[in-house]
Image (spheres, rainbow, N blue to C red):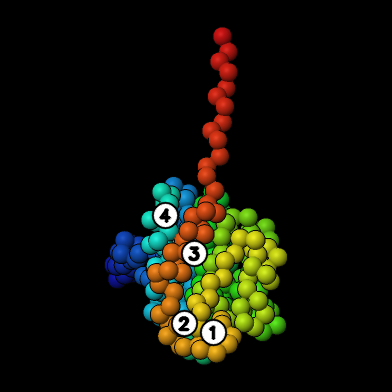
Amino acid sequence: MRFVQLSSMFSAALMAGALLTVPTVAPGVTPVASAYDCPDVEVIFARGTSEPPGVGRVGRALIDSLRQQTSKKVDEYAVNYPAGRLQLGGGDGANDVIRRVKAAADVCPDTQLVLGGYSQGASVIDIVTGTQVGGISWGSQLPANLADQVVAVVAFGNPAVRTGGPISQQSALFGSKALDLCNPGDPICHEGPGNEWTDHTDGYIPALTSQAANFVAGRLRSPGPAPEPEPMVR
């Protein structure tokens, strides 16, 4: 009997210790903003091929430039997907974007969302916005009822530009709020002679990321007018 009691006490102590030491958010996972700390703007960005987890070089330059161009609080979310050379993770990335947008809509309905991607990350945004690449639609598109919370879409080095058309032309939901930027000479998005691979890897920072940030800043909504005070009843 004493052994059973000691065993039970030991198990309870282990459980209590586990509850105290297990983090509330897994390492490396960006938590969804709470209802008490919702940013004015969140940039959801998908990095390019073989870049380490995060928003990538182009995403970082875009976000830093946007923060300089607006007084609004700008948070960021790095799309969680395997940006490998075989480029088989686009569907996973699209699903992660959709999950993030849904979570923001539930918890932070007033947060303005910006979708962005570079290179393979731009293909992730193609899927989310229903933009065909080479005439093919694949993966999950963002539901139409969530589209209004997305105020801007920006893509850099998007392969869809030369294999079907940019997001601004193809996407019924997001075309009017989208900007596709292709550095001249980038073989991923530019068709013609004189293309160089360095125009894809090194040609977007800082000029085109600053241009995109200016586009996004111009699309951010200002807060609505304050409600009229209730008349005093005497």
**Three-letter amino acid code at the position of disc 1:** Ile
Sooner in the amino-acid sequence: mark 3 or mark 4: 4
> In the shown orientation, is residue 22 left or right of residue 111?
left
**Three-letter amino acid code at the position of disc 2:** His
| Label 1 sits on residue | 188
Sooner in the amino-acid sequence: mark 2 or mark 1: 1
Q: Secondary structure at mark 3?
A: helix
**Three-letter amino acid code at the position of disc 3:** Ala
Q: For residue 200, which numbered disc appears in the image?
A: 2
Counting every numbered tag in the picture gives 4
> In the shown orientation, is residue 118 left or right of residue 135?
left
In the image, residue 218 sits, relative to residue 141, either above or below, namely above
| Label 4 sits on residue | 69
**Three-letter amino acid code at the position of disc 4:** Gln
Q: Is residue 21 something that shows in the picture? A: yes
- Contact, CB < 8 Å: mark 1 with mark 3? no
Residue at position x 52%, y 59% from top?
215
Label 3 to label 2: alpha-carbon separation:
16 Å
In the image, residue 222 sits, relative to residue 191, either above or below, namely above
Neighbours of disc 1 within 10 Å: few (<14), some (14-19), many (20+): many
Neighbours of disc 2 within 10 Å: few (<14), some (14-19), many (20+): many
Q: Position of residue 66 (x, y in %)?
A: 43, 59
- Contact, CB < 8 Å: mark 2 with mark 1? yes
Neighbours of disc 3 within 10 Å: few (<14), some (14-19), many (20+): many
Residue at position x 64%, y 83% from top?
163
Label 1 to label 3: alpha-carbon separation:
18 Å
- Contact, CB < 8 Å: mark 3 with mark 4? no
> In the shown orientation, is residue 23 left or right of residue 47?
left
Sooner in the amino-acid sequence: mark 2 or mark 4: 4
